[in-house]
Image: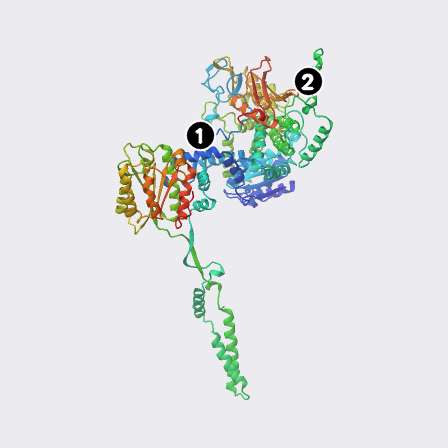
C-alpha cells in the first residue's frame, strides 16, 4: 500500500504538484477506478477504516427511483405499496419537488453502493468516499449492525424472499398473498426483537423446520385447541392464577414481536403464510439498526467524505474546482434551517451528525476548559481517529447524543426545549442553550432519538384460551400519549385477520395504571359486513 | 478491492410489476377518478392518458403510531433567537406538535394521491365496464397505423432492399471513370494471342507482338482485379420511411336533446357514447372534426361545454336538430371532402307531429350523406325492461324503426347503463349484415 501511495505521489505534474486524478465533469470507468484507489489509500491508511469489500454500481435515474421505492434494496419482492411509492416519488421527481439522492448504499458484504450516472466526476468522488467508505465502515463496525444484521446473508435472503413470494403468488393467487403482506407490513414496526438476538438468516429450511415443529407440537399437546373447559374449583382461586402464569410461560408471553408470535402461534395460518410473515419480520429486523443509528451513520459518512476530499485536495489529487463543487454539495447536505424557517422539517441528521463528529475531533485536538470539564475522557487526547472509531463502533443515536453533545454545539445550533403538556394551553420553553439548559436539552434530544420510546410499545400479553381465543395486546402508554385512533383500528383489524379470532388492544398508562382506551375487533368469523 | 459495475443497461421497468399491483389495488378509486376525469374532459381529449388524483384512503398503509394530540410531549428545536426559559407560546390550533413536517409535503393535499396514467392504462379503465371485446380494445388503443413508404435511396440497408438498378448504375460509372478494362477487351487480346501462338512460324515482329500482347493482357487483368466490378460504395438500398396510413377526414355530429328531461346521468351516458364513437373515428381518419348540436324546441350549434353542461328549458322538437345538421353540412362539410358520421342521443321524447318530419329528413336528406348514423335512446332501467324483447319504444323510437329497417347505415339502441353502449358499436363492424344484431 505504501508503495502505491508513493507511486501515486510520484506522478507529478508540471508545477511540481502531482497531476490531478481528474479534470472536468465527465467521468469514465478508468477515472472512477483511479479515484477510488486514491480514496482508498486515504481511507485505509490515514483514517484506518475497516470496510467490507466494495461494489460500486452505476445506475440511471430511473433505476435510482426503482431502488428508492423498494426500500433501497436491490432485490425485493413485489407489492403494491412499492408501486405506490414509486409512482409518488416519480411524480415528485418529475415535477422537481425532490431531487434524487446521489447514492444508495446497502449494508451487505460486498457493500453495494449505487451511484447515479448523472453525477459529475467530482460528485462521484464525494459519493464513493461517503458511501463506500463512510457508511461501509459504520455498517461493518457498529455494534448494532454486528449483532443484529447479517451482511453476508442479506442479499441471498432477499433473493429467496422474492422468489418465494412470486411462487406463492403463482400457487395461491396474488390477492391471497397481498392480504398477508398488507397485514404483515402494518405490523412491521412492532415486529422486531429489541432485546433478544435474532437467529441467523436462513432460507428455505424455514418452512420445513416449522412443519416438523408443528407436527411435534400437535402430536404432543395443543393448549390452544383444547375444547373442554377446565373445571374450575371455586375453593382454590390460586390455581387459576397458576394456570395463567403457566399458560403465559408456555406461549412465551408477553411477546414484543407481534409477527413472530403470530407466525408461531396463530391457529389458522398455512405454512406459506407463516413463511411470509417471517420474511416481513426478518426484513423489519434488518432495518432496525438503521433506524437507531441514522444520525450517526450519516454523520460518520459525511465526516469521512469531508476528511477524504480535503485530504485529496491537500495531496494535489483533485483540482480546486472539484473541491469547490464537492464543498458546495456538502454544505447543501449539512444545511440546518431554524425551526421558524419554511424549509424546516426537523433536525437534519446529516447536519447534526457531521457537526458532532467534527466537534469530537475538535475536543480531542483543541479542547477548551469547558470541554475538559464535560469530556474529561477524550478532551485533548490528541487521537481523534481512535476516539471517533470507538464512537462509531459502540454507540447508537440516543446514547451518542447523551454522551457527546457538547455545550458548544448546543450553542451553535441554538437548541431549545419545548414542553407541551395536555393540561396546559401554552407550550412552554423549558430550556435553552445556557448553563442551566445544556443537560436538559441534551437529555430530551437524546430521548427523541430513542426508537423504543418514539415508537409505540405494544406487546402481546395474553390469549384467552378458555373463552373465544381472544388475543390481548397491551400498549404501554407513556406521558399520556395514546395511539392514533384511526390507524389503531385499521392495524388491529389486520392483527385480527392474521389471528383468526377476536383481538383486543388495551392502553395502559404506566404511571397511573389507568386504562385510557380499549379497542376490540372481532375475528373474521364474527363480522357480519365482511 | 473494488468491483465497478455498469448497471445502466439492466432491464428497465423493474417497478412495472409493482405499478400494476398498485393500479389493481386502487382499481375502484382509480376508476372513479377516471370517470370523473372523463366527465370533465372534452370528447376529443378523453382518450389521452394523464393526471388523476385519488383519495389516499383505500391505499393507506396503517401503522400503529402515536397520536399527535393529547399527552405530554417534549421536543428540541434548533435556531432559538429570542426565547428564554419560562416563555409561554400559545399552542397552534389543532396540531400540537407544531413541526413544519406536513407543510413541507409540497402543496399536495395529504388526502389526495396524484399520479399520471398512461394512455393505454387510462383507456383500459375507461373501457372496463363497456364490455368491449379485447380485440377492439387493442385496436382502439393502437394510436397510429404506419406504413413504410418508399423514400429515395440509402447507403445502408438490408439485402432484400438492394436496389440493383441504382447499384449497377453506380458501378458502371465508377468503372468507366477508373478505366476498368472490360472482359471483352481482354478476350479480344486473348484471342489474338491465341491466334499468334497457334502459328508455327513467327517472325520477329510477331514475336514482339506476342510478348506485348502477353504483357498487355496481364496488365489489363491486374487493373481489372484492382478495380472491382461492384464496390461497396456502389451499393444502394431502397429507403422506406414510416408514413402514417393515409386517412381522410371525417366529421362527427353529436346531436342531443337537452331539454329538462335529460338529466346529468343521461348526458353522462351520451358522453361516453360520443367518446367511444370519436375514438373509433380517430383510428380510421386522420382528422376528425366534432360538431355539437343541441336542441330543445329549437336547435343550435354550440361548443362542447355548453353542450354537456348547460340546461335548457323548453319543449322537444327533434327535427330542428336535423335541419341544423343539414345546414352545417351544406355550409362547411361538403360530402366530397368529408366522411360524415352522426350520433344522436335523446330520451325519446318528441312532440307528436314532428317525428314524421324527422323520418322524412333522415331518409331523404341526411342518410344519403352520412356514412353512419347512430341513434341511442337513453331510458331508465325499468323502461328498458318494459321494452325488452319488443321492438317498441318511445315516440322517436317508433318513428325511427321504419328508417332502421330501410337503411343499413342507420343503427338504433336503447341504453340504460354503460354496458349497453358497446352493442351499438358492434353494429359498426357488422353493418353489412343487419342480421348479426346483438340483442
Looking at the rendered structure, the secondary structure element under dot 1 is loop
Q: Quadrant of residue B388 in the image?
A: top left
Looking at the rendered structure, the secondary structure element under dot 2 is helix
Q: Is residue A514 above or below residue A84?
A: above
The residue depicted at 53 percent of the width and 35 percent of the height is A80
Residue A368 at x, y percent in the picture? 58, 21
Image quarter (top left, top right, bottom left or bottom right) of the N terminus of chain A: top right
Q: Nearer the viewer, residue B64 or A434?
A: B64
Parent chain of label 2: A
Q: Which mark is residue B335?
A: none
Q: Residues within 10 Å of mark 2 (few under 14, many from 20)?
A: some
Image quarter (top left, top right, bottom left or bottom right) of the C terminus of chain A: top right
Residue extending furthest front? Answer: B390
Q: Nearer the viewer, residue B101 or B349?
A: B349
Q: Which residue is mark 1?
A: B108
Q: Which residue is mark 2?
A: A244
Residue B298 at x, y percent in the picture? 26, 37
Q: Quadrant of residue A364 in the image?
A: top right
Residue extending furthest top? Answer: A235
Amino acid at each position: 500500500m505504501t508503495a502505491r501511495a508513493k507511486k501515486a505521489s510520484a506522478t507529478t505534474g508540471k508545477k511540481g504538484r502531482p497531476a490531478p486524478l481528474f479534470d472536468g465533469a465527465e467521468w469514465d470507468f478508468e477515472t472512477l477506478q483511479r479515484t477510488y484507489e486514491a480514496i482508498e489509500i486515504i481511507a485505509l491508511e490515514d483514517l484506518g477504516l475497516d470496510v467490507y469489500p466494495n461494489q460500486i454500481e452505476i445506475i440511471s435515474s430511473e433505476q435510482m427511483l426503482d431502488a428508492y421505492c423498494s426500500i433501497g434494496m436491490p432485490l425485493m419482492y413485489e407489492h403494491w405499496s412499492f408501486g405506490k411509492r414509486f409512482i409518488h416519488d416519480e411524480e415528485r421527481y418529475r415535477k422537481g419537488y425532490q431531487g434524487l439522492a446521489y447514492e444508495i448504499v446497502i449494508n451487505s458484504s460486498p457493500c453495494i453502493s449505487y451511484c447515479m450516472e448523472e453525477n459529475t466526476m467530482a460528485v462521484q468522488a464525494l459519493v464513493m468516499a461517503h458511501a463506500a467508505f463512510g457508511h461501509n465502515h459504520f455498517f461493518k463496525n457498529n455494534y448494532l449492525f454486528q449483532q443484529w444484521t447479517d451482511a453476508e446473508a442479506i442479499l441471498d435472503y432477499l433473493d429467496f424472499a422474492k422468489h418465494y413470494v412470486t411462487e406463492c403468488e403463482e400457487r395461491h393467487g396474488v390477492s391471497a398473498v397481498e392480504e398477508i403482506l398488507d397485514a404483515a407490513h402494518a405490523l412491521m414496526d412492532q415486529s422486531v426483537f429489541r432485546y433478544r438476538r435474532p437467529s441467523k438468516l436462513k432460507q428455505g429450511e424455514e418452512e420445513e423446520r416449522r412443519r416438523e415443529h408443528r407436527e411435534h407440537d400437535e402430536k404432543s399437546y395443543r393448549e390452544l385447541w383444547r375444547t373442554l373447559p377446565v373445571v374450575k374449583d371455586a375453593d382454590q382461586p390460586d390455581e387459576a392464577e397458576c394456570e395463567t402464569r403457566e399458560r403465559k410461560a408456555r406461549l412465551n408471553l408477553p411477546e414484543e414481536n407481534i409477527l413472530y408470535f403470530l407466525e408461531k402461534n396463530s391457529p389458522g395460518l398455512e405454512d406459506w403464510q407463516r413463511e411470509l410473515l417471517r420474511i416481513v419480520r426478518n426484513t423489519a429486523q434488518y432495518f432496525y439498526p438503521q433506524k437507531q443509528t441514522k444520525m450517526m451513520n450519516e454523520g460518520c459518512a459525511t465526516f469521512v467524505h469531508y476528511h477524504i476530499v480535503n485530504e485529496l485536495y491537500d495531496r494535489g489529487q483533485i483540482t480546486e474546482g472539484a473541491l469547490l463543487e464537492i464543498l458546495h454539495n456538502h454544505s447543501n447536505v449539512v444545511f440546518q434551517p431554524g425551526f421558524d424557517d419554511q424549509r424546516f422539517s426537523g433536525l437534519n441528521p446529516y447536519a447534526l451528525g457531521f457537526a458532532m463528529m467534527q466537534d469530537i475531533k475538535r475536543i480531542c485536538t483543541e479542547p477548551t476548559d469547558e470541554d475538559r470539564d464535560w469530556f474529561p475522557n477524550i478532551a485533548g487526547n490528541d487521537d481523534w481517529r481512535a476516539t471517533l472509531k470507538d464512537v462509531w463502533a459502540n454507540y447508537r443515536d440516543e446514547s451518542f447524543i447523551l454522551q457527546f453533545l457538547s455545550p458548544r454545539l448546543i450553542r451553535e445550533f441554538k437548541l431549545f426545549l419545548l414542553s407541551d403538556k395536555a393540561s396546559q394551553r401554552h407550550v412552554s420553553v423549558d430550556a435553552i442553550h445556557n448553563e442551566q439548559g445544556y443537560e436538559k436539552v441534551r437529555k430530551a434530544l437524546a430521548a427523541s432519538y430513542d426508537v423504543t420510546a418514539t415508537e409505540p410499545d405494544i406487546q402481546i400479553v395474553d390469549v384467552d384460551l378458555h373463552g373465544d381465543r381472544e388475543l390481548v395486546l397491551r400498549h404501554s402508554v407513556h406521558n399520556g400519549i395514546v395511539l392514533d385512533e384511526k390507524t389503531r383500528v385499521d392495524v388491529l383489524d389486520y392483527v385480527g385477520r392474521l389471528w383468526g379470532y377476536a383481538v383486543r388492544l388495551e392502553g395502559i398508562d404506566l404511571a397511573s395504571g389507568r386504562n385510557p382506551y380499549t379497542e376490540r375487533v372481532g375475528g373474521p368469523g364474527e363480522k357480519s359486513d365482511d | 478491492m473494488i468491483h465497478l459495475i455498469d448497471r445502466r443497461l439492466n432491464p428497465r421497468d423493474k417497478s412495472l410489476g409493482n405499478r400494476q399491483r398498485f393500479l389493481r389495488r386502487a382499481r375502484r378509486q382509480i376508476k372513479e377518478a377516471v370517470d370523473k376525469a372523463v366527465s370533465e374532459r372534452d370528447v376529443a381529449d378523453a382518450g389521452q392518458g394523464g393526471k388523476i388524483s385519488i383519495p389516499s384512503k383505500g391505499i393507506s398503509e396503517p401503522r400503529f403510531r402515536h397520536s399527535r394530540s393529547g399527552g405530554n410531549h417534549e421536543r428540541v428545536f434548533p435556531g432559538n433567537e429570542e426565547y428564554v426559559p419560562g416563555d409561554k407560546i400559545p399552542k397552534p390550533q389543532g396540531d400540537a406538535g407544531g413541526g413544519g413536517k406536513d407543510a413541507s409535503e409540497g402543496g399536495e393535499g395529504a388526502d389526495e394521491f396524484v399520479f399520471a396514467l398512461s394512455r393505454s392504462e387510462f383507456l383500459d379503465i375507461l373501457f372496463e365496464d363497456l364490455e368491449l371485446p379485447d380485440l377492439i380494445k387493442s385496436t382502439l388503443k393502437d394510436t397510429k397505423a404506419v406504413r413504410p413508404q418508399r423514400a429515395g435511396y440509402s447507403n445502408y440497408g438490408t439485402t432484400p432492399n438492394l436496389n440493383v438498378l441504382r447499384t449497377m448504375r453506380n458501378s458502371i460509372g465508377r468503372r468507366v471513370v477508373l478505366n476498368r478494362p472490360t472482359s471483352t477487351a481482354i478476350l479480344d487480346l486473348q484471342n489474338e494471342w491465341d491466334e499468334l501462338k497457334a502459328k508455327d512460324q513467327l517472325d520477329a515482329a510477331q514475336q514482339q507482338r506476342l510478348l506485348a500482347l502477353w504483357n498487355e493482357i496481364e496488365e489489363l487483368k491486374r487493373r481489372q482485379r484492382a478495380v472491382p466490378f461492384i464496390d461497396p460504395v456502389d451499393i444502394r438500398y431502397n429507403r422506406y420511411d414510416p408514413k402514417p396510413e393515409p386517412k381522410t377526414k371525417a366529421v362527427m355530429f353529436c346531436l342531443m336533446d337537452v331539454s329538462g328531461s335529460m338529466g346529468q346521468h343521461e348526458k353522462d351516458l351520451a358522453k361516453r357514447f360520443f367518446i367511444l364513437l370519436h375514438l373509433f373515428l380517430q383510428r380510421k381518419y386522420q382528422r376528425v372534426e366534432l360538431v355539437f348540436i343541441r336542441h330543445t324546441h329549437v336547435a343550435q350549434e354550440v361548443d362542447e361545454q355548453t353542450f354537456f353542461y348547460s340546461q335548457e328549458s323548453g319543449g322537444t322538437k327533434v327535427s330542428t336538430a336535423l335541419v341544423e345538421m343539414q345546414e352545417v353540412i351544406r355550409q362547411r362539410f361538403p360530402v366530397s371532402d368529408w366522411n360524415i358520421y352522426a350520433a344522436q342521443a335523446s330520451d325519446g321524447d318528441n312532440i307528436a307531429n314532428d317525428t314524421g318530419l324527422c323520418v322524412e329528413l333522415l331518409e331523404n336528406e341526411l342518410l344519403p350523406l352520412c356514412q353512419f348514423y347512430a341513434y341511442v335512446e337513453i331510458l331508465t332501467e325499468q323502461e328498458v325492461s318494459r321494452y325488452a324483447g319488443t321492438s317498441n319504444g318511445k315516440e322517436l323510437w317508433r318513428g325511427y324503426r321504419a328508417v332502421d329497417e330501410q337503411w343499413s347505415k342507420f343503427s338504433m339502441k336503447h341504453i340504460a347503463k354503460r354496458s349497453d353502449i358497446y352493442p351499438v358499436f358492434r353494429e359498426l363492424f357488422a353493418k353489412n349484415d343487419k342480421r348479426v344484431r346483438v340483442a
